[in-house]
Image: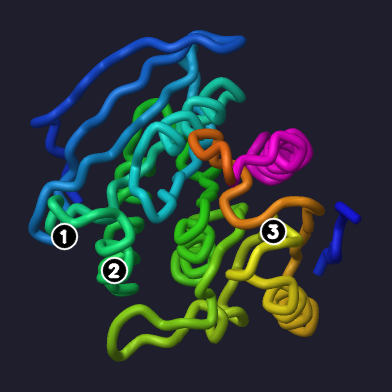
Amino acid sequence: MDGRLSVLSAGVVVDAAVTVGLKGGSRSMACFTRTMATGGAGMAVYEALPDGTQRFPAIVVIQHAPGVDVFIHRMCDRLADAGYVAVAPDLYHRLDPTRDGMERFRLLKDREVEEDVNAVVDYLQRHPRVDSKRLGITGFCMGGRVVYLMAAANPSFRAAVAYYGGNIKVAWGDGVVAPFERSAEIHCPIMFHAGADDTNPAPKDVQEFDAELTRLGKPHEFFAYSGAGHAFMNFTSAERYREAADALSWPRTLEFFARYLRP
């Protein structure tokens, strides 16, 4: 059954490449891509802004293996439509762009990922439209893994939502440990959405994550969705997308962020 496995209480910005557009959901929003300096290189960051002049909570959106594509743009837009500044950094910016997403995904290093996400956090903390004390993070596929990592690595985040994060027990690069081994460092509530038919993470992996966070007394909410496998949110893939799981999980995500990021 779909449901809750557990609920516990316990760089410098360079505007060298900015593309601006307007999109409309229930609200109007501005969306654009800018280039940010990090790691000695330029990193493209997609940004979606809600309509209004006040300061908003902000959410970092971490890409899936294909990259910062139409799907990730839409997830940012949905968050902006809900009243959040949403930004998605291109974590592949150090890698050969002629390689496909899966090739580049296998070359990522945790130290560089942390550096890039921390640069985005620094940017948001200086952003004139952002309430710097109300930052969250979400991600999909490899992005779900990065969410788990950054919930431990950066104390600026007040809430984290991971969608079907795989390889959480695998370290990327030398001299680092897997995100799972940093579970004790997680400093904010975390929500995890998983497909009951997924193989990475498999249901037994999700149960292990849940058990470890329970043991450590970390506030968390885990949900499993029947009839859904990996990438069930990806509407660009007719094979993988599951509308029912999207319809169940997204309101839970918005409620979770509202609970921890709204005044």
Going from N to C along the chain, the mark reached first, 2 or 3, is: 2
Magenta: predominant secondary structure element? helix
Q: Which residue is mark 2?
A: 108
What is the spatial separation of the Cα atoms under label 2 and label 3, in whole angstroms? 23 Å
Which quadrant would the N terminus be assigned to in this image? bottom right
Quarter residue 224 falls in: bottom right
**Residue found farthest to the bottom:** 175
Type of amino acid under label 3:
Ala
Residue 148 in the image: state x and y as whole percent: 54, 66
Task: Describe the element under mark 2 as helix, strand or loop.
Answer: loop
Task: Describe the element under mark 3 as helix, strand or loop.
Answer: strand
Q: Which residue is mark 3?
A: 194
Going from N to C along the chain, the mark reached first, 1 or 3, is: 1
Which numbered marker is on residue 163? none
Using residue 51 as the reference point, say whether residue 224 is left or right of it: right
State the residue at coordinates (72%, 61%). Answer: 197
What is the spatial separation of the Cα atoms under label 1 and label 3, in whole angstroms? 29 Å
Going from N to C along the chain, the mark reached first, 1 or 2, is: 1
Q: Which region shows up in magenta? A: 240-263
Q: Which residue is mark 1?
A: 95
Q: Nearer the viewer, residue 243 or 23?
A: 243
State the residue at coordinates (51%, 60%). Answer: 147
Task: Describe the element under mark 1 as helix, strand or loop.
Answer: loop
Q: Residues within 10 Å of mark 3 (few under 14, many from 20)?
A: many
What is the spatial separation of the Cα atoms under label 1 and label 2, in whole angstroms? 8 Å
Q: Nearer the viewer, residue 42 or 124?
A: 42
Type of amino acid under label 2:
Leu
